[in-house]
Amino acid sequence: MKISEIFNLEKSQRELDFINIDVEQDLPLFLDPYFLSNRNDAWSTSAYRTIQSYFQNVTKLLKDGNYKSAENLFQFLGEPNETCLGVSSGNPRGRGVGADEATKIFTYIINSKAIESGIVSHMEDIPVFVENIGKDKISDLTTNVIRMHLIEYTKAQCKLHGIPLTKNVQSGYYWDREKLCWDNILTEMLVINERRILLVPKGVVSYSFRYTPDQYCNHFVLNFLQNEHVRLRTSLVRVETLKDGSQKIYPPSKETLREIEKPYKKEYLREFTKNHPEIYMQFRELTKKDMKSIDDTELAEDDINLDTFIDYLIDRLSKITTGSKSASDFHKHIVGVLQFLFYPNLICPIIEKPIHDGRKRIDITFDNSANRGFFYQMHDIKKIPCQYIFVECKNYSSEIVNPELDQLAGRFSPNRGMVGFLVCRDIENKELFRKRCTDTYKDSRGIILPIDDKDLISILNEIKESRSHSAVEVFLNNLLRDIILN
């Protein structure tokens, strides 16, 4: 049974930021440290810093010859079955990092000499160069290291959706990058059927099929070897003389090179990379460009189709009455709508985020994870700070006026961000309201983007008609232009 069903959330995967796992079976998705390393949202950046902290400590100890202390850093890698991710069949049970397996992993790393030689400088390099360690084990290791990040994310999502937590639960060991050691504390956790559950942001997982030894070997190492044989005109190169006297050169096939060189072996990859580190750097850089967040359709094959889903969002919005009694319903619905519209550019929504030591609260805060489009251009081209995007929801029956604008503008700061949405039911005079937003912008108090029911319904219908989220970008760019150039 899925999380949304257990707690009657009445939300589909498209409306949820976390993976809507079935707690009775694993989903073949992984936490890939390389994917995390190339993301720019606050959650991923912080999680990867913790991964680097752990791995840098392991690396230092190994290079100093302090093997016993290095081995001790592997002793708390228990079976992380809390996420229900991986490749096991049947009930989730952890795929590869129990106490005995952790010792084996350490032995594999030691025997490879990959860290001491400098070939492995990041944790994500381990599956590429170390025998018997694949994406499942590195995902498990990553889960253990960043467990506290996942716990805090789970707490935030449970608060957002009204899911009860259990107090005084053992967190399980996690890496504390401040203390530079493993720690285990009592904390609030999501517990289902006496089992701890960790929710994972859907935007940070992958199938981990790009940053692999096979990809490195097939598309980089073998390409290099083919070119070298051509350059040196070895006996494996076939040269054909054409009728016009020109020559056509045929490099040896990759199949031939695999049979002769055996480049798929990790021992070969280590030696090759030691001699040609620039090829591995090409692999890292080009692979980064191909990696992206998983799509909702890949996570929710049994979900309702797009047309039915959008009709449902619109119908539910229209049925929420205005006023304070329905404010919570409006708030919860808007979270789901915005999640659908803005994913994967905005992730990790947090409800009622306290600022100024709790003296003020923000309705919803999203992490900006965009690497293209509107939310990326805001800070990259327009130079408007927006590492976080703020959302204020107003279920008022009356017109929204200056105090509401001032309230949202008061949340802004260069360190948190200067962009936010004011979501309300109806803006009668949109031209006048946007002029008020223009005044806020010209006073250097940030960008406030007003959206009402009609706007949301229009965008949703455009998505249904075009089968594309491009309508979101068009709406946002037109709205921003009106405000800046008004």
Image (tube, rainbow, N blue to C red):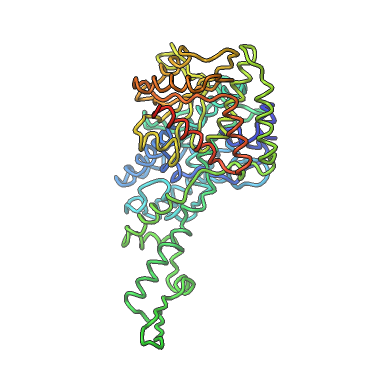
Which residue is outermost to the left? Answer: 64
Residue 282: in sight, yes or no? yes
Q: Position of residue 152 (x, y in %)?
A: 50, 27
Q: Is 365 in front, or is 419? A: 419
Left or right of 454 in this view: 312:
right
Q: Is 196 in front, or is 209? A: 209
Left or right of 484 in this view: 153:
right
Left or right of 436 in this view: 316:
right
Query: Which quadrant does the C terminus fall into?
Result: top left
At x 44%, y 62%, the residue is 219
Q: Is 356 in front, or is 117? A: 356
Q: Is 447 in front, or is 366? A: 447
Q: Position of residue 209 (x, y in %)?
A: 52, 53
Q: Position of residue 127 (x, y in %)?
A: 46, 52
How many numbered marks, from 0 up?
0
Task: Judge whether 111 appears above or below 260 on screen.
Answer: above
At x 41%, y 33%, the residue is 46
Left or right of 249 in this view: 334:
right
Q: Position of residue 418 (x, y in %)?
A: 39, 25
Task: Judge whether 8 appears above or below 344 on screen.
Answer: above
State the image quarter where residue 296 is shown: top right
Residue 186: in sight, yes or no? no
